[in-house]
Amino acid sequence: MCLNIFSAQLSHGSSTASLRWLITESNRVNKMLVLLSAEFDEAEDLLAASPNATTKSVSDDGGPQHATLQMGEDSEGEEGETDQTELLAPQKKASGFWTFQYYQDLFDVDTSQVLDRIRASFVPMPGKNFVRHHLRNSPDLYGPFWICATLVITVTVVGNLATFIQMHGRTDYNYSPQFHKVTVAGIVIYSYAWLVPLALWGFLQWRKGVSSSVGTYSFMETVCVYGYSLSAYIPSTVLCVLPFEIFRWIILLVAMCLSGFVLVLAFWPHVRRDNKMVAIGLLASIVLLHVLLAVGCKEYFFRRVEAEHMPAAVVTTTPKGTSAHTKA
């Protein structure tokens, strides 16, 4: 009898526990159904908003996917290389001209890039455009600024030193540093590196509006080309310290030819389809201004002091003897 009572109580406890478990599981299932219903309602709303949307099944991703890049025929000449370098060039987000970020980007350049551009300006290669192959839509002002500053220092310091070496040992010569030449060199070189590119850029912009076949660079690219082209003058002016007039002319002419060749190779592709007289006149102007810069620096900073420009010794006879003095 006691066993029957114990069995009845046990079965009653088991049924109570089972009922609680069923209620708990039922509540969990209801929550899951509510979540699924909400998901389906959201998907239905999205499909209603975009009726043309397509779905992709998971089975479509079963196999490996391959991307195929269709390339056209290889273009010949410089234009094909230009397109390739433009695609490979890093694209920077353009900033406003009056913002600090705009000028910060122009000085954000690696040392390896500056050295590569300097090497390219020393050894210009026919068929390789300096802008497209080395600037690659990323002009900088760091290189041109310091190249011009270095050239100002070398041309003035070496010019004074060359004059001192030439006149050293003469009793009628008193050395005095010519600091005013630093100002002259700075005005001439920086004006050439900024005003000439500005005039050239404006002219090309005007010709581009007249003839659609004329191309142009941005103003900063034009300044960058002119700035890097002056790098060939730095070692040549240092070598001009040697007191040999013919050697000075030769070394400066070599630097002028290398530097001018960079400019001609850079701007010829943009003007070759223009009127022949305009194209030839433009290139002649570029070369002429370059020649004037080289010859002007040679004649002003490395001018040879001729004997007739030196104070002459005048001999006078007095009753007490003969005396000599210099005449200014």
Image (cartoon, grey):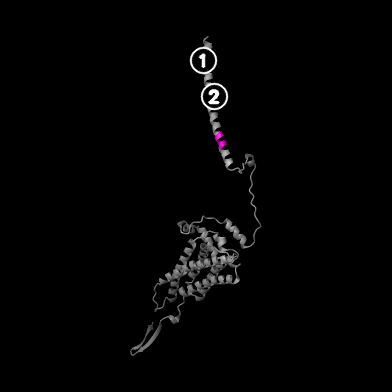
> Marks 1 and 2, how far apart in space?
20 Å
Residue 71 higher or lower than 324, as above or below: above
Percent across and percent down for residue 288 are 53, 73
Residue 70 higher or lower than 260, as above or below: above
Looking at the image, which residue is at 58% across and 38% down? 44
Q: What residue would you read off at disc 1? A: 9
Looking at the image, which residue is at 58% across and 58% down? 86
Q: Which mark is residue 217?
A: none
Secondary element type, mark 2:
helix
Please give left or right for residue 176 compared with residue 45 in the image: left
Direction right: furthest residue: 73
How many numbered marks does the figure carry? 2
Q: Nearer the viewer, residue 239 or 92?
A: 92
How would you rate the neighbour count of disc 1 (Cα within 10 Å): few for under 14, some for 14-19, many for 20 or more?
few
Please indicate, yes or no, whether residue 314 appears anywhere in the rendered image: yes
Q: Is residue 128 magenta?
A: no
Q: What residue would you read off at disc 2? A: 22
Percent across and percent down for residue 198 are 50, 66
The image quadrant where one finds the C terminus is bottom left
Direction left: furthest residue: 320
